[in-house]
Amino acid sequence: MPFEEALIAIVRTGVRLSDATLGPLAPTVERRSDYLKARSWAVPPPPGPKPAPDPRRLAAFTQGTGLDALCELVPPPEAPYLGEGSWDELFERLGTRLPTEFVALMERYGYGLFADWLHFPAPLRSDHRGLAKAVEESLYNYRDLRDDFPDYQPLAVWPEPGGFLPVVDTQGGDEIGWLTIGEPDEWPVIVYPRHNDQGPPLDGRLTDLILEWLRGNFTTDGFVRLFVDEDDPFETIRFEGMSPAPEQV
């Protein structure tokens, strides 16, 4: 029925829906109580000046390499959450040890998000929130897609020789890990992009790639631009540590 007729029917008799009736409504209206508390609006005062970044963070935005520089730029949690297992248990489940620099990175930061974009699962947790389970699911999904679309999923996957081993995912659906070529500390970093064709391995270790990305010096699939020149980078550069509920295995 036309809107006016529908409105009259809702007020007077009600309109029958599939499993309920809309109306009838009271034929009078009244103001909500919160309107009685309304008052005139005034322009709020301008915000005060932002506090200056810590000098060490400011220096780390342009200087230094490796984990020490990253920790100066992005202070890690005081008590990072890794999980209740051990590295040896994780390595046994994966069938390989992981690069030393990744272990050091996780022991400083643990489970959480860099700049609301890079997501690190809890490395030593054994259930669905842990790294081992995330790796297993990612490899299963990649193999399944590769069977149907080999041109778009050209990588070998762990434990195949030189196979892709993902350990990080992004809010955009990309996955970041290594090609397992040679010894773990020699593995090249590679991104499996969600929205583009597969690209080549990246130059540099994972920790330094994250550091240069947070500085705004490096962007590629999986490492999106976080800010532009007029933005305050320190509003974006942060790590949010997470502490999930107890394991359920």
Image (cartoon, rainbow, N blue to C red):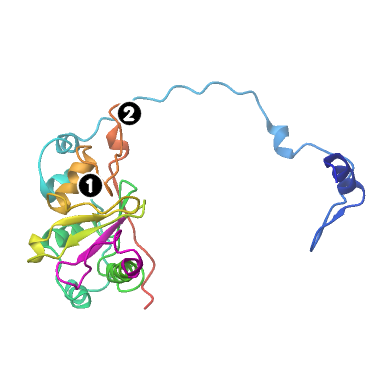
For the residue marked with disc 2, what is the amino acid? Lys
Residue 156 higher or lower than 3, as above or below: below
Callout 1: SS: loop
Q: Position of residue 120 (x, y in %)?
A: 28, 58
- Work out whether 6 lies above or below 15: above
Residue carrying label 2: 50
Residue 57, position as x, y percentages in the image: 19, 38
Q: Residue at x 35, y 66 (%)?
A: 145
Residue in the picture at 37% in, 64% down: 244
Residue 27: image tag: none
Mark 1 and mark 2: Cα distance apart in space: 19 Å
Residue furthest front in the image: 151
Judge the density around disc 1: few (<14), some (14-19), many (≥20) Cα neighbours within 10 Å: some
Q: Would you say residue 163 is visible in this rendering?
A: yes
Give the residue at mark 1.
75
Range covered by the magenta-colored residues: 144-169
Residue 215 appears in which quarter of the rendering? Answer: top left
